[in-house]
Amino acid sequence: MDMEITKQDYLKRYKEELLINEKSKATIEKYVSEVKLLLDYLEDHEQSKASILEYRDALRKNYQARTVNGKLAAVHSFLQFIDKSEWKVKFLKIQRRSFAEESRELTEKEYRKLLETAKSKKENRLYYLMLTLGGTGIRISELQYITIEAVKKGKAEIDMKGKCRIILIPKGLKEKLLSYASQAGIQNGYLFKSRNGKPLNRSNIWRELKRLCEDALVNPNKVFPHNFRHLFAKCYYAIEKDIAHLADILGHSSVETTRCYIAVSLKEHEETLTKLQLII
């Protein structure tokens, strides 16, 4: 690293590099924030691979392995940017979980309960939003691609992080969304939008879901946008046991990521073991 270049200059140049590489806004904010922490650390340490190793060890004491690896991904990106790839360190090894955490797993029964409650409370936008997340498996950041035009076509073209894929909108969902659009007077553009016409903010959706949990009597720790994606994956895999195809639908670059989505709960595993009838 060039000592004559200030920390702020490094951060500014690195941010520009991320923008050029078309990284998402969230990724840029996260990576720049993580690199700032690294540079703060290196101010009091020798600038070498040994210090990066020490930094990794320091992270291990305060964060879980998955979080540490996320931080290291940003560090590695920055090291490559400054031509110090030889300083990269190994990610922490993480054993793949065999079981899902039941305390955070949204069940199909709870999903239906949320829908019923939203419908009875006339929370129409939230009702159709949950239907869309559960019926397509899209990420909350991809909700902006569900436009009136996409619904009419029966498919949405997702273009994020340099990856493009097609999301099919099932016929039943298409009919419901067009009906909602007609009722709400939405003729074009985003289907789920705020009063100023912009796509719904993630935090707004989060708050609406948490409020709904109280009336639906569903554990709020289970109800967050990404869990609808997990529910879609489990229900899809239960019918069509093709993990490679499911990975494509979800937009995963690795089936290992998809495996985490379809992990069975301990209770389900125990029921399967019982069905084996090997304990006699």
Image (cartoon, grey):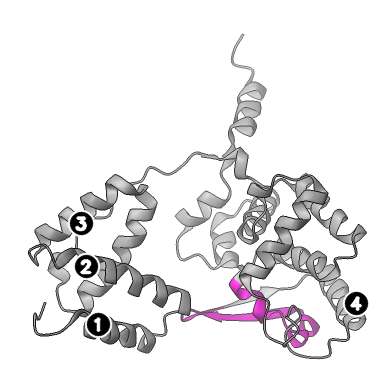
Q: Earlier in the sequence, mark 2 or mark 1?
A: 1
Residue wearing tag 4 = 179
- Relative to 214, is 129 above or below? below
Task: State the image coordinates of residue 62 (x, y, percent, origin top left).
Answer: 32, 48
Rendering quarter of residue 141: bottom right
Q: Residue at x 76, y 47 (%)?
A: 110
Residue 148 lies in the magenta stretch:
yes
- Relative to 266, is 221 above or below? below
Q: Nearer the viewer, residue 172 or 224?
A: 224
Mark 3, mark 4: which one is toward the viewer? 3
Residue 146 lies in the magenta stretch:
yes
Q: Earlier in the sequence, mark 3 or mark 4?
A: 3
Task: State the image coordinates of residue 280 (x, y, percent, origin top left).
Answer: 62, 8
User: Does residue 250 appear left or right of residue 148 in this picture?
Assistant: left
Identified by mark 4, the residue type is: Ser
Q: Regarding mark 2 in the picture, which secondary structure is present there?
A: helix
Q: Nearer the viewer, residue 209 or 273?
A: 209
Q: Earlier in the sequence, mark 1 or mark 3?
A: 1
Residue wearing tag 2 = 40
Mark identifier at residue 166: none
Q: Give the number of marks.
A: 4
Q: Nearer the viewer, residue 49 or 39?
A: 39
Task: Write the start and end of the magenta stretch as one range.
Answer: 141-164
Q: Earlier in the sequence, mark 2 or mark 3?
A: 2
Q: Residue at x 10, y 62 (%)?
A: 45
Q: CA distance from mark 3 to mark 4?
A: 55 Å
User: Is the C-beta separation of discs 4 and 1 under 8 Å?
Assistant: no
Residue wearing tag 1 = 8
